[in-house]
Image (cartoon, grey):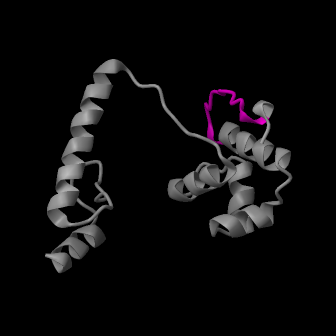
């Protein structure tokens, strides 16, 4: 890989459509077909098409796999006050994972309760 290819450019992502355009641009610049990318990531070609078109309801975990395969790094800028809160939440999640013996974070609803499937899996593991 040449030094020119190592240079990364930051782009604001204000919408699902903007992220889709970035994914499409990187895929096309690397001359990867949609069906080949889908196969490498383990998703359908239709999923890849949906992401590139900016469909707002796609599964985030699968989108993150597409980004990883294409070498696209995703980051966010947050206020410094939120950074301290994030550290606290990350520490709590890590401690919880150690207690339950899992590496996967529990799925929490907005009201703070766990997803029923995750709660059932925890009960079975204890």
Dividing the picture into quadrants, the one containing residue 108 is: bottom left
Q: Looking at the image, is 86 positioned above or below residue 118? A: above
Q: Which residues are magenta?
A: 5-16
Residue 11: tell me if it is visible.
yes
User: Does residue 20 lie above or below 3 as drawn?
Assistant: below
Q: Where the C terminus falls, by quadrant?
A: bottom left
> Which image quadrant: the N terminus?
top right
Image-based side of 31 in relation to 118, left or right: right
For the question of whether residue 57 can be seen, the reply is no
Q: Residue 76 at x, y = what percent? A: 48, 31
Left/right of residue 56 with respect to residue 120 in the rendered view: right
Q: Quadrant of residue 3?
A: top right
Judged from this view, the residue extending furthest toward the top is 80
Above or below, 55 relative to 22: below
Tell me which residue sits at (79%, 60%) in the image: 34
Instruction: Give the x, y percent position of residue 35.
Output: 79, 66
Question: Which residue does the image show at 65% across and 27% down from the upper left?
Answer: 10
- Residue 14 within the magenta-colored segment of the rendering: yes
| Residue at 72% over, 40% down | 22
Q: How many marks?
A: 0
The percent position of residue 2, horizontal first and vertical second, equals 79, 37
Left or right of residue 41, residue 124 in this image: left
Nearer-the-camera pick, 14 or 3: 3
The residue sitting at 29% across, 72% down in the picture is 117
The answer to which quarter of the image holds residue 23 is top right
Measured as percent of width and height from the top left, residue 30 is found at 82, 49
Q: Is 64 included in the stretch rendered in magenta?
A: no
């Amino acid at each position: 890989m040449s030094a020119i290819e190592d240079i990364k450019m930051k782009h604001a992502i204000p919408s699902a459509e903007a992220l889709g355009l970035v994914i499409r641009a990187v895929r096309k610049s690397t001359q990867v077909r949609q069906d080949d990318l889908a196969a490498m990531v383990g998703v359908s070609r239709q999923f890849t098409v949906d992401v590139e078109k900016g469909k707002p309801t796609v599964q985030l975990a699968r989108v993150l796999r597409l980004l990883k395969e294409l070498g696209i790094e995703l980051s966010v800028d947050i206020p410094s006050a939120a950074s301290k809160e994030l550290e606290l939440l990350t520490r709590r999640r890590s401690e919880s994972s150690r207690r339950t013996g899992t590496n996967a974070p529990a799925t929490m609803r907005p009201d703070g309760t766990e997803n029923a499937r995750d709660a059932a899996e925890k009960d079975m593991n204890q």
